């Protein structure tokens, strides 16, 4: 791995963690005795660690809270000891606690409504992050579109290309994807009938205890009787409009139309990054569309590689 230079940003991640007692959202703040400051839980990525896992791990280490990631928030960029630092943030719902224990890095934890929390925060950048959080919905629903992991080469003996398995890199990628996708909680899972797609989502399905539903319209080439990409896009639009946490695994050939259909169903045209940037997802890559009230509130793309 390349050595980090002084010009490279320090990668970090965290979350605005919320809970909703009595229909009044509260957020968690932590106190760091080293700096005598109040901030949101966050921390530096370990070498080779995916940013999603950094956010989950750092929140757990600093607060002992278990979270599910929601909409993506604006990243913070600032300098620490002359070196740039980039911190990725999400809104995150608290789903449990393992019991906070004060330590040398974080010695206090408080839950506060937005107003008192803003007054307690030590940095203006965190106050702006809280303003962004409160300006939108706390809770949101993920709709995830995933391209299958790496597979072995096509075989002339399988003209419909449905039986091709994952290769060794794809198997490892599917295991990592199970952990990454779990960051967004428990989703309904629909997949192309191709084995390479089914094998990609099986580890996640086993981890969250969900059965994989096979959707013939998502296969490439489409199964007999299917109208191909148009039917796949129509089916995705229907699923996105249902407002249920959902994961769809499909192919390079039909994913651009499926992503566009999902965004249209959620009331969005081309957003920042645009459809062109998403038209060729690499194997194992995925797009997360978060919606609230049937309206798109954030979109993000992730690769398997850091």
Image (spheres, rainbow, N blue to C red):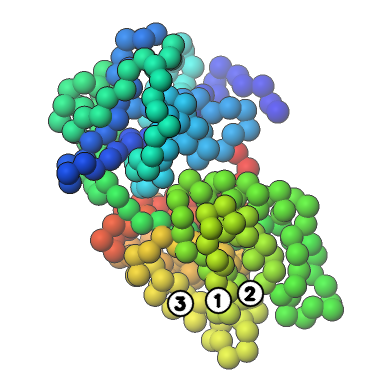
- 190 shown above or below 126: below
- 90 shown above or below 194: above
Return the mark for residue 215: 1
Q: CA distance from mark 3 to mark 1?
A: 9 Å
Residue wearing tag 3 = 235
Q: Is 257 or 201 nearer to us in this picture?
A: 201
User: Of label 2 and label 3, which has the lower sequence position?
Assistant: 2
The image position of residue 163, as x and y in percent, is 75, 73
- Taking 91 as reference, is 154 left or right? right
Judged from the image, the secondary structure of the residue bearing numbered disc 1 is loop
Q: Are marks 2 and 1 in contact (CB under 8 Å)?
A: yes
Q: Is residue 266 visible?
A: yes
Q: Is 179 or 277 nearer to us in this picture?
A: 179
Q: Hey, which quadrant is residue 198 in on the image?
A: bottom right
Q: Residue furthest bottom?
A: 225
Residue wearing tag 2 = 193
């Amino acid at each position: 791995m390349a050595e980090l230079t002084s010009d490279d940003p320090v990668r970090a991640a965290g979350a605005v963690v919320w809970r909703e007692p009595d229909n009044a959202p509260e957020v968690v703040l932590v106190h760091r005795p080293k700096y005598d400051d109040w901030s949101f839980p966050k921390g530096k990525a370990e070498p080779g660690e995916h940013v999603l896992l950094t956010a989950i791990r750092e929140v757990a280490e600093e607060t002992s809270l278990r979270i599910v990631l929601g909409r993506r928030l604006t990243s913070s960029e600032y300098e620490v000891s002359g070196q740039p630092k980039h911190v990725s943030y999400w809104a995150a719902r608290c789903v449990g606690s393992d019991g906070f224990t004060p330590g040398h890095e974080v010695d206090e934890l408080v839950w506060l409504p937005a107003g008192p929390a803003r007054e307690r925060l030590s940095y203006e950048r965190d106050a702006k992050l809280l303003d962004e959080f409160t300006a939108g919905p706390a809770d949101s629903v993920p709709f995830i579109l995933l391209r299958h992991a790496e597979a072995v080469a096509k075989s002339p003996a399988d003209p419909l290309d449905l039986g091709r398995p994952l290769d060794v890199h794809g198997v490892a990628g599917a295991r990592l994807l199970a952990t990454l996708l779990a960051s967004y909680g428990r989703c309904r899972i629909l997949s192309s009938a191709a084995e390479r797609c089914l094998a990609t989502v099986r580890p996640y399905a086993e981890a969250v205890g969900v059965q994989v539903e096979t959707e013939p319209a998502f296969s490439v080439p489409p199964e007999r009787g299917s109208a191909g990409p148009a039917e796949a896009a129509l089916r995705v639009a229907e699923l996105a409009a249902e407002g249920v946490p959902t994961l769809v695994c499909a192919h390079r050939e039909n994913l651009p139309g499926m992503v566009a259909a999902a965004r249209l169903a959620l009331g969005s045209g081309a957003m920042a990054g645009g459809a062109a940037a998403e038209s060729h997802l690499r194997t194992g890559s995925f797009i997360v569309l978060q919606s609230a009230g049937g309206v798109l509130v954030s979109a993000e793309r992730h690769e398997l590689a850091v």
